């Protein structure tokens, strides 16, 4: 997606250990117009797929997820990193965050993910696929069908796609980074 690729090259910043900072337009300050273009592209790619719900993990997945839900007129559910005391029956799994170097639990109420759901997961980044693995597990526990996953940015050198494809789930990402070596952003040609 050209607009996204151009923006990553213009405003993305490399950090040590393979981290790309995009907080000028995706996950701190946000560009709603670019986010809309991103979601229109996800919708085009999944046009022939039946979806009844968008799912994500807080916090940075919420912006693309709500935009997707708005454009498709579908409900949006985000997995929570803290269990609210008011939540009844829930599904729970563990996710390792490599940006924070720790494990955390994520929960979703059974009320909002269950049998018969056909869900599309969206998130800002695909790195090692740990968040994706957690979502695959939550959908399996719920008996929901995970029809696909969509990432704004995939870091191919961290191989998260292998986890998703090994689970038989379709994976789409809109900008693929081949390398961040020597603080240089190398994007895959389209
Ligand atoms: P994974 O679970 O695939 O290993 O990592 C994905 C999650 O970690 C995303 O939800 C994202 O929030 C965060 N993340 C992974 N890599 C990066 C990165 O390079 N930059 C930023 N800003 N977040 C990242």
Image: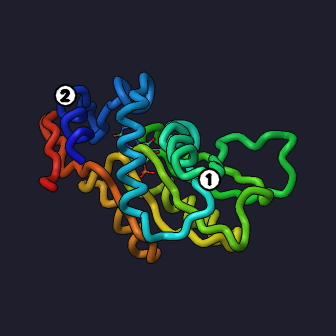
In the rendered image, residue 135, in percent from the top left (x then y), is placed at: 57, 60
In the rendered image, residue 11, in percent from the top left (x then y), is placed at: 24, 26
Going 27% across and 31% down the picture, which residue do you hit?
A: 15
- In the displayed structure, 25 sits above or below 60; it is above
Q: Image check: 12 left or right of 80?
A: left
Question: Crowdedness of circle 2 by 10 Å Cα count: few (<14), some, many (20+)?
Answer: few
Helix, strand, or loop for circle 2?
helix
Which corner quadrant of the image does residue 117 belong to? bottom right
Q: Nearer the viewer, mark 2 or mark 1?
A: 1
Going 83% across and 47% down the picture, which residue do you hit?
A: 87
Going 36% across and 28% down the picture, which residue do you hit?
A: 25
- In the displayed structure, 44 sits above or below 114; it is above
Determine the CA span between mark 2 and mark 1: 33 Å
Q: Disc 1 designates what residue?
A: 74
> In this orientation, does residue 81 appear?
yes
Which corner quadrant of the image does residue 114 belong to? bottom right
Q: Disc 2 designates what residue?
A: 10
Helix, strand, or loop for circle 1?
loop
């Amino acid at each position: 997606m050209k607009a996204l690729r151009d923006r990553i090259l213009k405003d993305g910043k490399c950090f040590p250990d393979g981290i790309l900072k995009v907080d000028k337009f995706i996950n701190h300050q946000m560009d709603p117009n670019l986010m809309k273009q991103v979601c229109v592209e996800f919708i085009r790619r999944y046009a022939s797929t039946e979806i009844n719900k968008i799912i994500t993990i807080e916090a940075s997945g919420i912006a693309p997820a709500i935009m997707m839900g708005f454009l498709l007129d579908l409900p949006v559910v985000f997995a929570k990193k803290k269990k609210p005391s008011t939540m009844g029956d829930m599904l729970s799994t563990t996710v390792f965050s490599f940006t924070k170097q720790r494990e955390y639990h994520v929960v979703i109420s059974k009320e909002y993910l269950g049998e018969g759901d056909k869900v599309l997961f969206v998130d800002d980044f695909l790195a090692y696929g740990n968040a994706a693995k957690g979502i695959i597990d939550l959908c399996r526990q719920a008996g929901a069908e995970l029809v696909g996953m969509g990432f704004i940015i995939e870091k191919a050198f961290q191989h998260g796609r292998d986890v998703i494809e090994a689970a038989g789930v379709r994976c789409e990402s809109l900008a693929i980074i081949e390398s961040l070596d020597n603080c240089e952003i190398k994007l895959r040609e389209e």
